[in-house]
Amino acid sequence: MQPADEILVGGKWRGGSGPVIETADPATGQVIARIHGAGVDDVADAVRAGQRAVADPAWRDLLPHERARYLARIADLVDGHAEDLARLQTADTGKSINETRALVASAAGTFRYFAAALETLEGALTPSRGPYLTMSVHEPIGVVGAITPWNSPIASDAQKIAPALAAGNAVVLKPAEWTPLVSLALGRLVTDSGLPPGLLSVLPGEGRVVGDAIVRHPGVGKVSFTGGTATGRAIGAVAAEKIMPVSLELGGKSPTIVFPDADLDQVVAGVLFGIFSSSGQSCIAGSRLFVHADVYDEVLARLVERAGKLRVGPGVDPATQVAPLVTHAHRDRVAAMVDRARDEGARVLCGGRAPDGPGAYYPPTILDGLDNDSATCQEEIFGPVLVALPFADEDDLVARANASVYGLACGIWTRDYRTAWRVARRVEAGTVWINTYKQFSVSTPFGGMKESGLGREKGREGILAYTRQKSVYLGLSEDPLPWA
Ligand code: NAD
């Protein structure tokens, strides 16, 4: 699959009106593609084409099973090009091939799930208070903006495009500057599926220019955003001005909690996977580890020993567990945050220094010796860096786990189901994993509490988020209203 050098605007492939975007393989630093990126003119054209496409009876009047067929066809095309898509995403993001294969499979599954969801989406016949039928129905919004980050592009894109199309909308997608290739490849497959042109535009370009133009455009009726909390706050402010619904999937600093009765073999594997898979570049990374004092030394010793054996290497090698970070600049940012942790008084138990040589590598790093209110424990590092803290008392643990602006996810490891249930209900997190971590089902809503976001993706909430609700009263009486 050749990387695209053009962008998809309202059903047409063309060079964008913005600056050229260079994208590099983080394992080598070599430029793999130059794209004629989008500019604000392309946003205007994409929105206009989207408005036309949603109003066209060829899309507007499709029966649910006919619309579902398009989504199923896109899923088949994604499956049919799975290996190419996975390799392209590995080259663009640095991610390990095992992970990008899983992300591609999840994208296909997302299109299939929302094809089924749209066929089973029902309105409601509500109890009436007179001689009329009362109904509540869901309608498409029109043109929606989808803005995604670089860490899992094809899965994040599918999580927005599939439910938005399923609900009958057109989508203007803006992938992240660093990783546009797989989003453009997905755009090609959507074009090949025969979906009426204009329903999907893919506009790689600068967030503050192209992303901002999408959010502000009066023809865009909703924005679904995944990315950092600061960007989410800026988008939310524009949405408030426009009185526009917005979904925000933002950052996290998720606590993982280990009680002394936990199965420690499971703990070690689960904690390492929770923080070091995706090289820690995951919103749900289990980056704050609370371990009961009775088992703290043992758990930390085992984690450090195993972290040192994780295979760090290029994403294309199927044996790689910790692949390069997305860019050299991001790797340097992670390294600077570990240096700041040292300045805060952290003990570096393993890792903590970028290796010499090419590639944006950073080793699995475990820190401790810090208070929960240190910057290292409060700020998202978005790299392979775990910070461990001991605890003794459950109330104090819950207070510290919740002492964060974020509320995205939480892991709990214990054999006692009462403890698990009690703590799961007390922790402020949109997702709680008990004796497992980072597992997902497209049927299960996902989203954050507090500054981790607004709204939910996946599940039936995922499609409803792209609809507007309308109530309809259908008069049944043959008599005039008692008025005249
Ligand atoms: P980011 O906020 O810098 O960028 C995300 C997207 O927003 C990019 O496409 C960017 O170009 C665009 N953008 C930037 N400024 C914009 C503006 N003013 N208006 C409109 N769009 C703008 O985030 P990132 O660095 O790409 O991604 C990492 C962040 O994403 C982390 O904080 C991570 O936790 C978060 N994330 C959250 C989830 C989740 O589901 N909660 C999933 C993945 C990543």
Image (cartoon, rainbow, N blue to C red):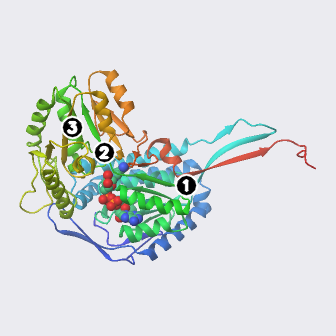
Mark 1 or 3, closer to the camera: 3
- The earlier-in-sequence mark between 2 and 3 is 3
Circle 1 is placed at which residue position?
Answer: 168
Badge 3 element: helix
**Which kind of residue does numbered mark 2 sit on?**
Ile
- The earlier-in-sequence mark between 2 and 1 is 1
What crowding class fits label 2: few (fewer than 14 Cα within 10 Å), some (14-19), or many (20 or more)? many
Residue 292, percent from left and from top? 20, 29
- Does the beta carbon at disc 2 come under 8 Å from ligand 1? yes
| Cβ atoms under marks 1 and 3 closer than 8 Å | no
**Which kind of residue does numbered mark 3 sit on?**
Val
- Does the beta carbon at disc 3 come under 8 Å from ligand 1? no
* Cα–Cα span, label 2 and label 3: 12 Å
Residue 483, percent from left and from top? 91, 48
Q: Is residue 101 left or right of residue 37?
A: left
Depth check, front residue: 454 or 134: 454
Depth check, front residue: 424 or 172: 424
Residue 471, percent from left and from top? 68, 47
Residue 48, percent from left and from top? 54, 71
Tag shown at residue 284: 2
Badge 2 element: loop
Q: Residue at x 69, y 42 (%)?
A: 135
